[in-house]
Amino acid sequence: KEIHQDIDQFVVSNKEQLEQFRLRFISRKGVVTELFEGLKTVAQEDRRAVGQELNALKNKAQERFQAFSEALEHQGNDAQGPAQDLTLPTFPNLTGTQHPLSLVRQRIIQIFERIGFDVSDGPEIESDWYNFGALNFPDNHPARDMQDTFFIEKKGEGSDTDMLLRTHTSNVQIRLMEHKKPPIRSIMPGRVYRNETISARAHCMFHQVEGLYIDRNVGFKDLKDTLYHFAKEMFGKDTKVRYRPSFFPFTEPSAEIDISCQICKGVGCNICKHSGWVEIAGSGMVDPQVLANCGIDPEEYTGFAFGMGIERITQLKYVVNDLRLYTENDVRFLRQFEGL
Ligand code: PHE
């Protein structure tokens, strides 16, 4: 019995081990031969049965030996471990998932690229001029206040300008207009920072996509058409869109864009405060002074700009009710976006 077990447990994965197997169980000095010799001492009446047992053992050892040598032969090179069974299933392929904000950013880019916009990028650490000054924010504008903006360096303390974390991606619009002649048709996705207490509805870091279109004869109609197209592409063709007069220092006229609430479909919920409408973007015709600040002649060119929060678009698209979910890396949240 013990020898049966020994044979079963013997592992052969190279030629040396095969030889050890042979010496131990098969050769004339091996254990099986030894047992056969002991057969003489077994009582006459038991000899037949014991002989049969030993024959079975001998056959087993030989069969195993045969199988091992064939396996080794197939393997070719005896140094490479056991032969691979190519019919076995592979290890499950655990791929990660795309973050919902990345999914939505890519979708936004795709929608605008198809109608001729390219993608621009710019710095997250910015001077006052690119974040505020060039955009017509007056010196005493409350957005510059310490409550909203993370200042990194203040003017006078070894720096000739205030340095800050950008509060919107409009800085990229200014840099683009400074360096490129119209026509300009570009969107600018990126991170922005505001000094807010983190809660379900606010975060000190979030993402925006702004867009800019500057050319001859660009009018408010182009702005409306473009964002109308975007809303329908992003949320489906049944989505309703409305424009509300608003104010931004860098656009005139300005409008906020609302869409019909995607969460409650008009029935009424906390997200739309039971109005049936949710704001998705700010927009307007670029103020002539902003064009002039960037060296573009406002007599020759006009343009529109818009800006939206990617978190907000994602919230409406996938019903995400707490902004903090985006940055907590809880896989139970992230896995819900698998395969999208
Ligand atoms: N920059 C604005 C913001 O962050 C959004 C905006 C962009 C509004 C372009 C109008 C035009 O709130």
Image: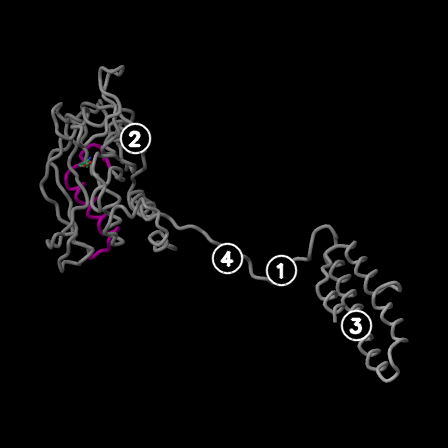
- Report whether 126 appears left or right of 99: left
Query: What residue would you read off at disc 2?
Result: 124
Q: Amino acid at mark 4?
A: Pro
Alpha carbon distance from label 4 to label 2: 40 Å
Which residue is pictured at 55% across the width and 58% down the height?
90
SS state under label 1: loop
SS state under label 3: helix
Disc 1 packing (10 Å; few <14; some 14–19; many ≥20): few
Determine whether label 4 and label 1 are within 8 Å by CB.
no
Q: Amino acid at mark 3?
A: Leu
Query: What residue would you read off at disc 4?
Result: 92
Please provide the residue range marked out in magenta: 211-238
Counting residues from the start of the chain, the first of labels 4 and 1 encountered is: 1
**Which one is in front, 76 or 54?**
54
SS state under label 2: loop
Q: Position of residue 235 (x, y in %)?
A: 24, 53
- Report whether 31 appears left or right of 290: right
- Report whether 309 appears left or right of 328: left
Residue 86 circle label: 1
Which residue is pictured at 21% across the width and 42% down the height?
202
In magenta segment, residue 215: yes
Q: Position of residue 205 (x, y in %)?
A: 27, 38
Hey, which residue is sitting farthest bottom in the picture?
45
Counting residues from the start of the chain, the first of labels 1 and 2 encountered is: 1
Which residue is pictured at 13% across the width and 30% down the height?
249
Which residue is pictured at 11% across the width and 33% down the height?
252
Q: Amino acid at mark 2?
A: Glu
Determine whether label 3 and label 4 are within 8 Å by CB.
no
**Would you say residue 172 is visible in this rendering?**
yes
Query: What residue would you read off at disc 3?
Result: 57
